[in-house]
Structures are given as C-alpha cells and as structure tokens.
Amino acid sequence: MSDYVTKSDLQVHQLLVDFVEKEALPGLSVTADQFWSGVSGIVAQHGPTNAALLRKRDDLQAKIDDWHRKYGPVANNPQGYEFFLKDIGYLIPEPADFAIETEGLDPEISSLCGPQLVVPVSNARYALNAANARWGSLYDALYGTDVIAREGDLAPTGGYNAKRGQVVVEKAAEFLDAAVPLAGGSHKQVTAYRIEKQDGAASLLIETSAGVTGLRDPSGFVGYSGNADKGEIVLRHHGLHVVLVIDRANVIGAAHPAGLADVVVEAALTTIQDCEDSVAAVDAADKVVVYRNWLGLMDGTLEDSFEKNGRMMTRQLNADRTYTAPDGQELTLKGRSLLLVRNVGHLMTTDAIKTADGKPIGEGIMDAALTALCAMHDKTSSRTGAIYVVKPKMHGPDEVALACAIFASVEQMLELAPRTIKIGIMDEERRTSANLKACIHAARDRVFFINTGFLDRTGDEIHTSMEAGPVLRKDEIKAEPWLQAYEDRNVLIGLACGFSGKAQIGKGMWARPDDMAAMMSAKSAHPRAGANTAWVPSPTAATLHALHYHEVDVFAEQERRRGEPVPPLSALFSMPIQVPFSLSREEITRELENNAQGILGYVVRWVQQGVGCSKVPDINDVGLMEDRATCRISSQAVANWLRHGLVSRDEISSTFERMAVVVDQQNAGDPLYRPMAENFQSVAFQAALDLALHGADQPSGYTEPVLHARRRQVKARAQK
C-alpha cells in the first residue's frame, strides 16, 4: 500500500494529508480541494523559476571560480573584480532612492525595540518557552548566570545563597536607577512602593530612607494590581515594561525593606519559530511535527508535559497580563512574544509532496503554503492579522522577488488580503549583501525586517571565494574589516530605505549561552549600532539583553547614524587570504582539530537523533550554540584548506578520527548517543567527513544536502 495520496495532480504523503485535512483546515473557509489545487498551481507556476535561479547560482559561482584561478584574490585587482561582477550580472544597478511601503505591522516590529529569540519549532517545550519569554525574571537571570561572580561567598549553592541574592537585589536596583530613576534618592533606599488613589486616579509614591519621593518621570508609572503586601507595579521606559513584584510573604520579598520579591522585565518582544537551520526535518513525518507545533502556537493549544526535579509539569502559552492603569482603565499587556516563522530557503526539495511524475517539490514552497495556512488560526500573536515569514539564504533580488511572488500566490489560494504575508530578509549571503538595496526594493511593500546573519554570511564568503586562496582561521575572520562593513551597510541601507519606525533592523546570534557576563559587555553594541533587535539563544539571555534596550535609545541612535556614508563594495569584498606558509604545522593542526571537533559534535546529534540545534562543547569544553550555519563555516574552512594544500585528505581523516574520541567522551552521559570511534564507517562519522572532504562541491557551501541524506539513511535503517 502506497504512503501517498493523489491530491489534484500531486502525490502527497498520507501523514501530511491527514494533518492538513484533519487539523489545519477545520475552522477555516478554505476547502481541501481549494488548498491542494492551489498548491499544485503554485508548484507549476514558481517551481521552474526556482530551479532556474538555482542554476544561476551555480553559473555565477563557476565564473567567479574561474576569475580567481586567473587573477588570485580580490586584493590583486579590486576594481577589476567589481567590474567583472557587474559584467556577469552578480552586481546589478542600485534602484533610485525609495522608502518601504509595508503596512499593517505590529508595534513589536515597527515601534518597539528589544531582543529576538530563535528556537526550533520542532521542539514543543523550547517553542513554548520562547513564546513565553516575553517576560523574564531579572532576579532569576542575575542569580543563575555568571553576570554575578560565582566564586567565594557568592558561589551558587544547592540551596539559596542569601549573599548572592543580596547582590542580585543591588544589581536590579542599579538597573531601576538607570531606567526608571527616582526624583530623589535611589531604588536601593526604597522601603515601600505605594499606590495612592485620589479622585479616581492613582499615583505612585515611593518611600525611602531619606523621605517620600516619586519617579523622576511620573509618566513611567502605567499600571498596578493587588495590594501593598502582594501586588505588582508596572513601569515603562523606552516603550518596554518593567514589573515590580511586591510579595512580603515571599522569602526574597520578606528580606527586602519594600517587599520587592522580583523585577520582571519585558524581554523577547519577538520570537522566530524556526523551520530551518535549527531543525532536522527530513521527511513528511518530521515536517508534520514542525507544522503541528506551529499550528498549536497559533491557535493557543500547544502544550508539553515533562518531568523536572522529579515532578511532572505541563507547559502552555502564557495568558495576557491585566492591570489597572492610573486613570482606572484596564491595562492589558501581551503575555507572549510576537511570533515569526522562518521557512526554509529556495535550495532544498521535499518528497512529502511530489509532482505527478514523482519529483519532489521545493520545500520552501511547501513551507510557505503550510505555515501560512496554520497562521490563519492565529489567536495568540499578531494583533493586526499579519503573518510574519522570515526567508533565509536568498541570493540577490531575483530570489527575493520569487519569495514575494510565492507569498502572493499563497495569499490568493487562501483568500487572504494582498500582502498579509510579510517577509523578513536574512542578509546572510554575499550576493544579497552586495545588492541589499535592490533586495529591499523587490520586497518594498511586504518587508518587515532585514537581519545580518554573520554566521551563514561567513560560510558564504568562504565558498564564494573558494578559489582565491586559503582562508584565515575562524577567529581571525571575525576580526576582519569586511564583516564590519557588512554590518554597517545593513543598518545604513535599511535606514536609507525608511526602516526607522516602520520595520526591524536586526543583528545576529550570541552563540555562547553560558557566557552571559561577556554577552552583557559585548551585545550593547547592537542597539548602539542602530539595530532594533538582536538574536539571543535562550529566555534568560533575552531577559538580560533586554537591559541594553533601556540603556540605549535605538531610535536616537538611528537618527544619529542617518546619513552616514555607506561602506563601499570594495570594503565588503576585502576578506584576505592566508599569506602562504605563514602558519606553522602546529597552528594548522590546532585549527583543523577545532573545526573537526565542532563539525563532529554537531553532526553526530543531527544524524543520530535528529537534533538540529545543540549546545556543543568546543575543543576547550566551552558550550557553543551550533546549528547548520556554524557547521557551514567549519566545513567550508576545512574544504578550503584542503583545496589549497594546507591539509591533505589523509590528515583530515586522521584528525576526524582523533576528534571522534573527544566528542564521544563529551557525550558519554547521553544514553541515546552512539560512539563514533568504535565505528568510523558509521553514518554520522561519514556525514561529518563528507562535509569536510566534499564541502567545496556543495551548493553554496550548504550542509543540508549531506545532512538530510545521511539522516534519512539512519531513519530508514531504524524502520527495518
């Protein structure tokens, strides 16, 4: 019996048919026939364009490879290189000045600035945690991380360390002094936060050891609930809310003169529920899990039960928060992040749906149709009815235009108003960076964000310049001027296109989830650069990064930067190569080991267990967030050094075998883990080796084709 059902002229896997017709369509006016015939039409209309654009990628890359073989690195002839890129159509003329025209955006996109979480939507618990990360306990975030020193008297203990707790309270008071200062004195001196009502209006009086005062800006008090012994006081600064939790019966509140048991900050304003780089979804069964969780987030039914500390817990979406405003009216604050969904890019195909002649369709087309269908049930996220789709890995304006055309066709199929589906442009491929203004112009009536993805961007930089010479070591690449030019161009071009006060300009991920002290030192640079948002790896990181948006007035920074000269293309194309023979064999070996360990640590869980995003210990046992973007950098770096003779195939193989022992030891506590060093012919080990040995031949240096094929191999063996 076939696993496929004929729908219109498509062959659709039964699991997907059941999901669409029994779960996603009920409650909508869209019929099954309408949906399937619509998908068929979209595949027929846009599939050939998608295929042609992928062929164009390969054609352009082949010509660039030939140029580098003839002339060497860009630095040998920078003007000639730019002329060449224009001649082959890699660079296109910039459009005349314009402003984006997108309408119907939620304030979290247009007028508020704050952290953005990215989470694999395939994991229900993580997806729920991220959606609920709109609010975070500052006390918990400070107490549980290295933002406060962990040595001596301040070391976290098995129980509650009162000395550490006191430092938490002091640091929280310092934040309050900066964000919502008192008219006189400090929040450290407060003995009572008191609501006083008169003539139907409420005001906030604050008693301190030096007397009674109020907020320096009284308009910062916007709501309250409860009473003097147990209640909440809502403050606002830079559009973000801060909740003072008063609870004198609480162990922490009882020790505070004002009964302040916690400070809760508005944190992850937006969350990207990811179907792409952090997800390992290789077949119909995997994709249905992705779509089902997204549907549950949209209609509010998603929940997940799990055991924690010996107790079963069930996680659900948080409700909105309700308070009384100073004028006596009800104040309702959203309890959850505004939810965005990241579809896959244009490259991959899926056999969850096949054409009449048995060919898999574009996975990005399927994602567009299914995630929009699920979003029609939205009861929890957008207040404007917008559907926010982040589209990754697009190469230039023609590919952006294709995504927009697909979205327009989906809107027509689902009878949605034109431009209901908004597009977030990931500026993470070099052809997009070089033509960013034209890319924005192609989506000017539906774009809601541009975001620098420096990880994928680095992987693409290596692949595009594969023939130029041996690349620098990874840590050296991070310090190169081209990356700063890339980041500056993104912000400045976005501002020139009218993004300020209308749409998001975003920055990339903090990849060390356990290193919050360093994040707090470094990541304030993102709002200072004029970015409305920046990616964080966890709800705790979102809570801490939120403080930066109180520290920095992003819109003032955008105004300051408006009119700055945009770095030229010569700066964007300036990544140098290694000086021949400048590295010792020891340095080469160390870098190869570092890359091999990172690739193996990520790939083994991807292939063996279907885990698309992992905290992987690096060679120094520092936990790093790894997804396909970080894997792309490492595999491209090794492939490049192989191409240019810094390492040999045998050296790569022996290094991977050596590092497999290290990765096995790092995963010894995982009962689902299967050691690689016991069998170097294992599917996981061979997948990692494939990425290194054949990375130069992968389309645009992407890891998906290898990982998908190897994961499907493991799943097929498990089903026998």
Image (cartoon, grey):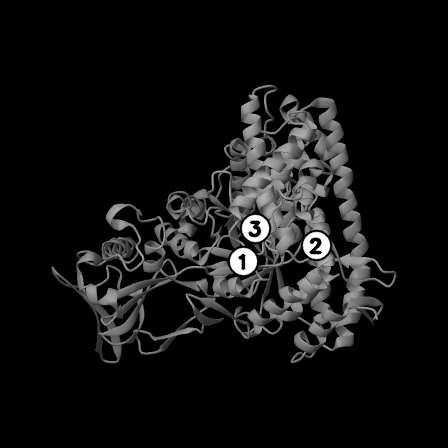
Q: Secondary structure under badge 1?
A: strand
- Give the left or right position of residue 49, taking residue 79 as reference: right
- Residue at mark 2: 714
2 or 3: mark nearer the eye: 2
- Residue at mark 1: 119
Residue 575 or residue 255, whichever sits in front: 255
Query: Residue placed farthest to the left in the image?
Result: 210
Disc number for residue 450? 3
Q: Amino acid at mark 1?
A: Val
The residue shown at (47%, 42%) is: 621
Q: How far apart are labels 1 and 3 at the CA level?
A: 18 Å
The residue shown at (54%, 46%) is: 496
Q: How far apart are labels 2 and 3 at the CA level?
A: 37 Å
Look at the image and tell me in which quarter the N terminus lies. Answer: bottom right
> How far across and down, in percent of the image, does residue 546 sit?
40, 55
**Cβ atoms at labels 2 and 3 below 8 Å apart:** no
The vertical placement of 644 against 280, above or below, is above
Query: Residue placed farthest to the front in the image?
Result: 678
Of the numbered discs 2 and 3, the one sitting upstream in the chain is 3
The vertical placement of 421 against 17, above or below, is above
Query: Residue placed farthest to the top in the image?
Result: 581
Residue 15 or residue 404, whichever sits in front: 15
Q: Secondary structure under badge 2?
A: helix
Q: Could one spot residue 638 in this view of the protein?
A: yes
Q: Amino acid at mark 2?
A: Val
Of the numbered discs 1 and 2, the one sitting upstream in the chain is 1
